[in-house]
Amino acid sequence: QVQLVESGGGLVQAGGSLRLSCAASGTIFRLNVMGWYRQAPGKQRELVASITSGGTTNYADSVKGRFTISRDNTKNTVALQMNSLKTEDTAVYYCNLKTVVPVRSDYWGQGTQVTVSS
């Protein structure tokens, strides 16, 4: 089992910055993808950004150039630096860890609220 604990959400004005962090613990296979998803009220959960254990990143078009995902494989942590925040970034942000080998798995954190005010 893997546990994911997020931190760093909060309230910020438009144009401001926030940094989300997620720490993974438990049995973590070396080859994995860690990522951040978000879900706004009345909307489906969507991918914000992901990063493989090898460092390959992927971003949603809506956050490219504003958000940066990073990870520390030695500490099993992933972070999301969010700059130039917009009101439409308001959502609950969830940390996620996926593996394919040696077993397929999909773990989620409890979520952290990010609210961007105008």
Image (cartoon, grey):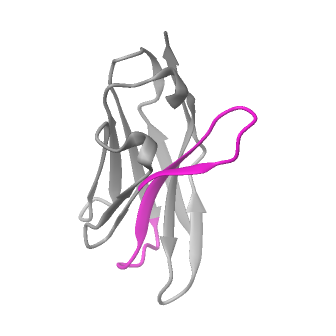
**Which contiguous range is marked in magenta?**
26-49
In the rendered image, residue 1 lying in the magenta stretch gets the answer no
Q: Is residue 23 left or right of residue 81?
A: right
Seen as rendered, the residue at the extreme top is: 118
User: In front here: 39 or 24?
Assistant: 39
User: In front here: 70 or 68?
Assistant: 68
The residue located at (40%, 51%) in the rendering is 23
**Quadrant in the rendering for residue 14:** top left
Residue 58 percent across, percent down from the top left: 37, 60
The residue located at (51%, 21%) in the rendering is 87
In the image, residue 11 sits, relative to residue 95, either above or below, namely above
Quadrant assignment for the N terminus: bottom right
User: How many numbered discs, if any?
Assistant: 0
Residue 115 percent across, percent down from the top left: 53, 21
The residue located at (23%, 64%) in the rendering is 74
Residue 96 percent across, percent down from the top left: 51, 58
Seen as rendered, the residue at the extreme front is: 61
Q: Is residue 106 left or right of residue 99?
A: right
In the rendered image, residue 30 lying in the magenta stretch gets the answer yes
Residue 40 percent across, percent down from the top left: 65, 34
In the image, residue 39 sits, relative to residue 29, either above or below, namely above
The residue located at (25%, 66%) in the rendering is 55
In the image, residue 40 sits, relative to residue 94, either above or below, namely above
Seen as rendered, the residue at the extreme right is: 42
